[in-house]
Amino acid sequence: MNRALQWKLIAGFLLVFLAGGVTGAFVGAAHARHFFFLAPRPAAISERLQRELNLTPEQVAKISPMLDKAAAELHQVRRDTGRRVHEIIGETHQQMAGILTDEQRRKLQQLEERHQRWHHGHGPHEPRPEASPSP
């Protein structure tokens, strides 16, 4: 095997290795996002409790409405918290706009748009108020 072919093979293996690493990172990040940031389903919680506590079917029937109610309340808390976070960030950006230059305001707007695109489809998001230009 000549030297040029050896280098081509090495480069090919490295490219395949890097492509696998990048793919793994994206898949891992998507899975981690789902695992850490999305709430577990009430049915999954019920099944886990039933298995770990050895609940009888009667107990499961009595506990299920409690879990459903808790899940609905937690969902509302997450919505309210997310909405409040977006309000605070929007208010802060409006306050900052008076201090920033035109170019900095454009960059801030681009950051907001990128953030919105990244979160598109991952829960309810209210449109953010536009940053008011400084006088």
Image: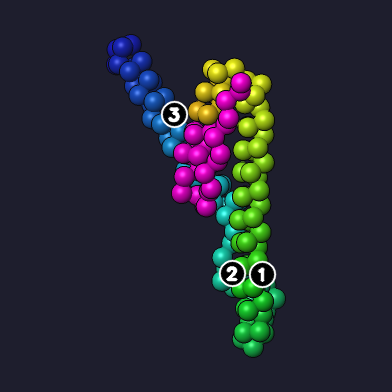
Compute the Cα span from label 1 to label 3: 44 Å
In depth, the one of 82 and 66 nearer the eye is: 82
Characterize the local packing of mark 2: few (<14), some (14-19) or many (20 or more) Cα atoms within 10 angstroms.
some
The N terminus: image quadrant: top left
Q: Which mark is residue 111?
A: none
Q: Closer to us: mark 3 or mark 2?
A: 2
Tell me which amino acid carries mark 2.
Pro
Compute the Cα span from label 1 to label 2: 9 Å
Tell me which amino acid carries mark 1.
Ala
Q: Which mark is residue 70?
A: 1
Reply yes or no: does residue 116 show up in magenta: yes
Characterize the local packing of mark 1: few (<14), some (14-19) or many (20 or more) Cα atoms within 10 angstroms.
few
In depth, the one of 8 and 101 nearer the eye is: 101
Residue range highlighted in magenta = 112-135
Give the percent coordinates (x, y) of residue 17.
43, 30
Residue pointed to by mark 2? 42
Counting labels gives 3
